[in-house]
Image (cartoon, coloured by chain):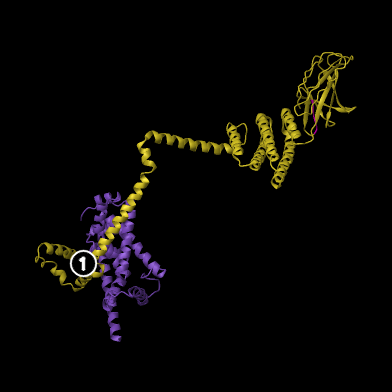
């Protein structure tokens, strides 16, 4: 005998089929499942199934069915309208106009790339990087778009501090050009910040920003002085000039007198006048260290040089102080040891602290045209 | 069985005629499933409405292409709707066996819940109400697969193969589920009948 679930299934299918046949051929249904009808247990399950199928509570009321169908169709229409309204928007227009789609795509790509490039450039701090120019432009635009002088000053102070932080990583001979650029940027941002602060009316905000500027300047002095030992001579000169602009005490060389020996390879002396020249300072001739240290005589720092090339007339003279600061002058007077001398005119160096010695004692032609700088 | 693939395709595009055809074909089964699980017609109609409105909202995302897949999807919506209804009423799924809870305790609890819903429904006579409550309780005590087999086989009139696809089982499993579902229903209804008689004798 087959399993009960098989027989039940057959019986249910017979009834289903029988019902259909009955509807088609009234009266022709009496031959089904005589064997199963003799199984009362199975028949009671069939009765449960039929009772369940015909329960009035699970039959749909026609008015409810009609009402819900109307709701369903109304809702479908609403959703269709919403979707078509969304579709009618932007994308179909692009589909119809390929040129517009292409242009917009290009603009979008350009926007994405330029935004990415700007974001990347904003992270660049090394002036040697090609994107540094973009960063400076970005900073300039940011300052221009700042609402007022206080906001501009705040931005300039922030950018100045960024430049100051960058300098430490560039303080070596391999990054001389980048160091110079970062130093120039620091100076520019500090000047801009000072100008913006000066334009502010007196008050708390101005006092606060002035204090921030002062603190930054002190930090800059401290950091730049710390960098001096790692710098080449030209960078030291530039850094010393920046220290002067920050209000630090730095050496100044006003003029130099070279007393040449009567014979080639004889002894020559160089006497420098200036301020803040320190004992133990080394002599710079034409931007190069001679290794000769000077001593003060009558207010002048005097250097004695052996084996001086008699034909050599220096273009610049300077000192490297023991603290690492350096200064130069091109105001140079040449004296011959026999009493003749060639004078040069006075001049003022770049930051106003390098005056050439204008003395021309006996009218001989000048040997050097002064070009003032540290 | 009539293929519903073309209707589904058109209904996904929002075609009203196709939606109407699907609605008419599946309304009896879904209403039957819901009505067997809740105590009154008004609730069954509300929940059925909810199911078909969700059908309209979600049909454009439906992947199913045949009656079995579509039925399974609708029954899933209906099951969630019914569960939500009982969750709202009792804060926990009602009419489901809890660990350690006896059948008698459950019946008392369910009776209470269902009686609450039936209060004020003049359409129900006391006799009919008790009978109907017994059916709802018995149906709710079946497993979800058993309920879906009964709906597919008895109300929607699906063959074994289609029913098997609806519940994701083999045809032999459908036969077994069908047998066990009817057997359980019979037993539960018999027990309910016996309790009813006992109560009448006490009265």
Magenta range: A318-322
Q: Secondary structure at mark 1?
A: helix
Above or below, B1 against A347 in this view is: below
Query: Does the magenta segment cover residue B99?
Result: no
Viewer-closest of A282 and A203: A203
Above or below, A130 against B155 in this view is: above
* Chain drawn in yellow: A
Q: Splitting the image into 4 quarters, where does residue A342 fall?
A: top right
What residue did someone put label 1 on? A8
The chief SS type of the magenta part is strand
> Left or right: where does residue A103 sit relative to residue A277?
left
Viewer-closest of B145 and A79: A79
Counting the numbered discs, the total is 1
* Chain drawn in purple: B
Quarter of the N terminus of chain B within the rendering? bottom left
> Left or right: where does residue B38 sit relative to residue A279?
left
Viewer-closest of B12 and A285: B12
Category of crowding for the residue at label 1, using alpha-carbon neighbours closer than 10 angstroms: few (below 14), some (14–19), many (at least 20): many
Q: Splitting the image into 4 quarters, where does residue A200 fall?
A: top right
Q: Can I make out residue A107 in this image?
A: yes
């Amino acid at each position: 005998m087959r399993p009960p679930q098989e027989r039940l299934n057959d019986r249910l299918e017979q009834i289903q089929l029988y019902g259909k046949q009955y509807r088609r051929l009234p009266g022709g249904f009496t031959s089904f499942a005589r064997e199963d009808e003799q199984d009362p247990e199975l028949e009671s399950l069939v009765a449960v199934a039929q009772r369940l199928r015909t329960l009035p509570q699970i039959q749909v009321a026609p008015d409810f069915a009609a009402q819900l169908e109307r709701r369903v169709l109304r809702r479908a229409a609403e959703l269709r309208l919403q979707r078509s309204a969304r579709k009618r928007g932007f994308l179909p227009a692009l589909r119809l106009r390929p040129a517009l789609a292409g242009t917009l795509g290009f603009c979008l790509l350009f926007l994405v790339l330029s935004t990415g490039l700007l974001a990347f450039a904003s992270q660049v701090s090394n002036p040697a990087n090609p994107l540094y120019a973009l960063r400076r432009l970005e900073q300039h635009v940011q300052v221009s778009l700042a609402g007022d002088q206080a906001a501009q000053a705040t931005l300039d102070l922030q950018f100045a501090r960024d430049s100051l932080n960058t300098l430490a990583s560039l303080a070596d001979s391999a990054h001389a050009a980048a160091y110079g650029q970062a130093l120039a940027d620091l100076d520019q941002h500090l000047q801009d910040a000072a100008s913006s602060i000066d334009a502010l009316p007196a008050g708390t905000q101005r006092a606060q920003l002035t204090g921030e500027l002062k603190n930054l300047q002190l930090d800059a002095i401290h950091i730049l002085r710390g960098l001096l030992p790692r710098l080449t001579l030209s960078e030291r000169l530039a850094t010393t000039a920046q220290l002067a602009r920050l209000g630090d005490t730095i050496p100044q060389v006003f003029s130099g007198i070279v007393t040449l020996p009567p014979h080639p390879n004889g002894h020559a002396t160089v006497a420098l006048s200036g301020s803040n020249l320190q004992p133990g300072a080394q002599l710079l001739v034409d931007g190069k260290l001679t290794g000769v240290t000077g001593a003060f005589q009558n207010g002048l720092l005097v250097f004695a040089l052996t084996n001086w090339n008699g034909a050599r007339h220096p273009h610049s003279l300077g000192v490297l102080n023991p603290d690492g600061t350096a200064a130069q002058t091109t105001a140079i007077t040449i004296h011959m040891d026999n009493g003749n001398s060639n004078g040069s005119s006075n001049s003022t160096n770049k930051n106003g602290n390098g005056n050439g010695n204008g003395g021309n004692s006996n009218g001989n032609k000048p040997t050097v045209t002064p070009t003032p700088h540290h | 069985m009539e293929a519903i693939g073309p209707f589904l395709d058109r209904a996904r595009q929002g075609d009203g005629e196709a939606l109407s055809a699907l609605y008419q074909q599946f309304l009896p089964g879904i209403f039957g499933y819901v009505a067997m699980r809740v105590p009154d017609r008004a609730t069954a109609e509300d929940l059925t409405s909810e199911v078909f409105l969700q059908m309209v909202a979600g049909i454009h995302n439906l992947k199913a292409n045949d009656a079995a897949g579509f039925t399974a999807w609708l029954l899933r919506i209906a099951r969630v709707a019914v569960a939500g209804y009982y969750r709202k009423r009792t804060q926990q799924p009602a009419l489901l066996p809890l660990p350690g809870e006896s059948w008698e305790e459950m019946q008392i609890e369910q009776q209470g819940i269902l009686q609450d819903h039936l209060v004020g429904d003049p359409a129900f006579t006391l006799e009919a109400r008790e009978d109907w409550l017994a059916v709802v309780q018995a149906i709710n005590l079946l497993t979800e697969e058993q309920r879906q087999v009964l709906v597919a086989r008895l109300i929607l009139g699906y063959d074994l193969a289609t029913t098997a696809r609806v519940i994701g089982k083999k045809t032999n499993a459908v036969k077994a589920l069908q047998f066990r579902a009817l057997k359980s229903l019979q037993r539960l209804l018999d027990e309910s009948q016996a309790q009813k008689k006992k109560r009448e004798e006490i009265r």
